[in-house]
Amino acid sequence: MKYVFILISVVILNNCGCTSKYIADRNLVEDPRFEHWFNIRGLGGDVDDGKNQAVFPSSELNIGMPSWTIAQWGTRYNFADPTVTTKKQLSKYSFQMKNQSKSFTVNSSTGELEMGLFASTCYEKQRNTGAPWPHLLISTPITDVRVPSGFCTVENIKKLRLQMDSKLLSFSTSQINPDLHSARFSIRIIIQNLTKNDDGYGDMLWFNIPIFDNRCELPVETFGRDTENTDASAKFNFNMAHTSVRPKSSTFFKENKVEAGEESGVIPTRVDLIPWTHYAFQLARKNGFLETTSFRDLYISHISIGWEMDGAYDGVMKVSNLSLMAEY
């Protein structure tokens, strides 16, 4: 009877808003070394049904449902199409797929991931304002939004330490308008009201952590409605400043120019996100968003990482040491 009670208690704790000082710290990213494979989504657009089209095996493990999803909207050549994409195992732990518009290499032993987006192959002419642009993103849920875990309730987390290292392996441009076009690599977290039967259930804000932006060495804090294109969510969008997540001296620039290649340094991202979630929520409420949501209703629901290029840029970013460590 005692054994049954303990099991029930654990289940209840995992699915409610309760926490205890005896709860151990945990990495909210379930698969930080990318061992559990990737679902591959389509290219987007009218002919894409939004469903998974293929799987990329990133390890020799026999897994069930992949942990991660690859989004490749607007990139012209589909990772799910074997006629244009090659997939191969480079070593015991290293796996790669590649086509004309993208490359994707995973080492599931070290947790290193190289994401290459070659947007110059995706544009037949210069992109105009409002037109879609290429993405290469990976994403994973932090909690099941249907039955959210109390471990992911923002109010219950004392510290939420985000960590990732980044190295820009290559970067180039061709035929771009610097007043309109950019190449950005970032981490994006969804903070969402997942309190069932609440008036604000499902409402959310975008919480963005900058990694690289070719337009400026030190991106500043910005916020507002997500309205970048016709598919935008219209939700509150908060972008942290570069200096809030890493030292001012840690950049991808040298003498005001982007520095890439083996000689470039590894750029660390280290930040406790909890004070910033309070700040972003207050900003959202002040600006007319999340009006029927209380802070106690908010959960960390989702994380994505990767490239967006709204001009003809080519770049490869290597990331490693990913964690989102919650302290209760």
Image (cartoon, grey):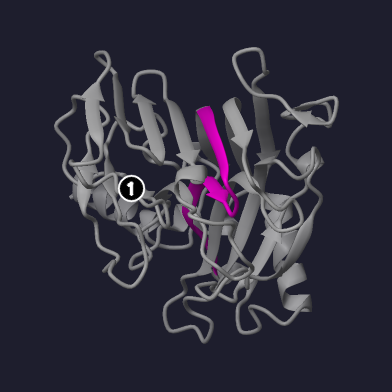
The kind of residue tagged 1 is Tyr
**Residue at 21% across, 46% down:** 81
Residues rendered magenta in the picture: 298-319
Secondary structure category for the residue under label 1: loop
Quadrant position of residue 155: bottom right
- Residue 259, image x, y percentages: 71, 24
Query: Does the magenta stretch mainly form a helix, a strand or a loop?
Result: strand
- Image quarter in which the C terminus is found: top right
Q: Nearer the viewer, residue 293 or 102?
A: 102
Please give left or right for residue 301 compared with residue 38 in the image.
right
- Residue 90, image x, y percentages: 27, 16
**Residue at 37% across, 36% down:** 31
Please give left or right for residue 102 compared with residue 84 in the image.
right
Q: Name the residue under label 1.
A: 77
**Residue at 45% across, 29% down:** 114
The reply to whether residue 217 is visible in this rendering is: yes
Q: Does the magenta stretch include residue 310?
A: yes
